[in-house]
Amino acid sequence: MEVTYRYANKSQVNSGSKQTDMSFAPDMSRSPTYFIGELKDKRRFREAMSCLHNVVISDLRFQPRNRDDYERWLEAEEQRLLAEFVSQSGHVQKELEEVKAELASMGKIANDVMGPYYKAQAQYFKYLYKNDIDAWYVLDPVITVHPDQVFFECFSEDESSYGKLSCQYDVFENISEQAYGTTNIDYSAGLYNEFQKIRDYRTTFLKIDPEGFNVQTSGHEVFDEKKIDLPESWVRGFLQVSSAMTLPMVKLRLQPMDIHNLCLHLKCNKERVGPRSMRFELIPGQPIRVVMEPWNEIIRFDRSIYQGETERSIRVWGRRRLLILERLLPIANSFDVFLMGDGLPSFYTANMDTMSFTLGLSGWSANDWSQAGNFDLLAPRESVDQSTCQQVLSALEENHYESALSLSTRLSLDISTVKSALALYSQSGQVLYDMELDVYRLRHLYNEPISIDDIRFDNEREKKAANFVQADLVSVNNVETNKNGTQMSGEIIDNGHEHQVILSIDQDQRLIAGECQCHFWHQNKLRQGPCEHMLALRLKVSGERLK
């Protein structure tokens, strides 16, 4: 999908010996949204904004090594080794020397021809990274001004991590101008570098530029217009993590030292085999324990007591993304951890008095089909007619944020109906659930509504799998979990035919084996991924675990 941003100028930070002015350029294609205020808690704001930047640049996908130099070296070394081998015979030494000289001459010519290209290529990427790093990222951060707070949102480059910085108005003083709404802001690497210059002894102003909306478009103004073709998986991942906030979770309260111990263990150890997970062992009234796999080392949090009523064991993956929170450890009072279940999204909120930072992690660092099989946040919920949905949205627009209970009372609607309507708008990027305050907030992710049908499924097989589950055509026969992983079996009725499906999931939640009776599986096995019947069975099992 293509998204267009229109900026009247560039965001910038002007630092002097006594004052710092931070001016964010808003997206002019949206309705006017602006804010001007003086920062009181400068140090925490600097660290929190820097942490937000770390989310944007986060990319833990596998990066293959650049082997160009090695291939060139190997080619030259191969010629030398071959020459030495042949020279041992002593029969063709003179001819060999001539060949070597010719090869050396040809190699020199090739280096002379290709050398400037390789040098220019390296210089280009180096320049791009330093001067136009926005080209490396997909989407500018989103900022929302509400009656009670200002909050920033962003999503990582690898489509697996979500960041949200919430600033209550107590963070500011001398607020002069504001207009409620949501807009994208022009956020560059240079702006991040300027954030590092914020100091307590300097007066610092935060400005979401209102002048950008007062420019008379007479044809003489210069606008920075960006047209970005967003991958549907990126948008879908953002909405999945965002929608996950609305579902029931286990809440834990951890101390900053607890998070430090987790990060320290990850930095001191490198796993070679799976499972690469953290297993939270939760016993009512007992200190929270985390088992770091595959070493099975136990980290005990003596000051963090589990307050739940049921003993549980929850495993989460993609744990190295927690290193994003390191910069917040010296300034956070506590951390709230929200866990949904094995292999499902998790959230970590750093509480900093008048500010909070939420890091949302998808079930796995790699945003592939296995994640969709584990957790489909866009699965159908209770059916709500369009007029009722619009009534709920209009009521929310009046106050910009409100709890589901308050909305149901004010509109005389059942609370389940209100929550279902809000969930639909959350899936389309128009509403955000605030886990800290248990309220729904009006927040338009883009300047135009998102079509759920365009981004809901990565391929036709996922769509068919969701239809099987929705039509109650999937029956789960058996689910067994042991030290090697999970084995499940079931039946799917497709066009009147019954398909027997068997799946094996390893400890890292990857599908490692499976069988089906359909034509797709017999033709491709798992070389092109699972068939729709396998996806349906896995989706059905994941849905039952959430209930």
Image: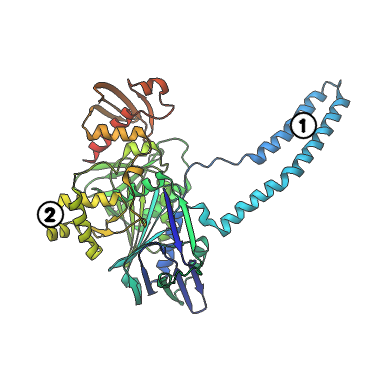
- CA distance separating discs 1 and 2: 82 Å
Give x and y (percent) for residue 40: 38, 74
Please, which residue is most extreme toward the right here? Answer: 94
Q: Is residue 40 visible?
A: no
Q: Nearer the viewer, residue 453 or 199?
A: 453
Give x and y (percent) for residue 358: 34, 56
Quadrant (top left, top right, bottom left, bottom right) of the C terminus: top left
> Is disc 1 placed on a helix, strand or loop?
helix
Q: Is residue 211 visible?
A: yes
Q: Which amino acid, by three-letter code, is at mark 1?
A: Arg
Q: Nearer the viewer, residue 520 or 249?
A: 520
Residue that mark 1 sits on: 80
Q: Which amino acid, by three-letter code, is at mark 2?
A: Leu
Q: Is residue 381 left or right of residue 464?
A: left
* Count of picture labels: 2
Report which quarter residue 150 is drawn in.
bottom left
Residue that mark 2 sits on: 413
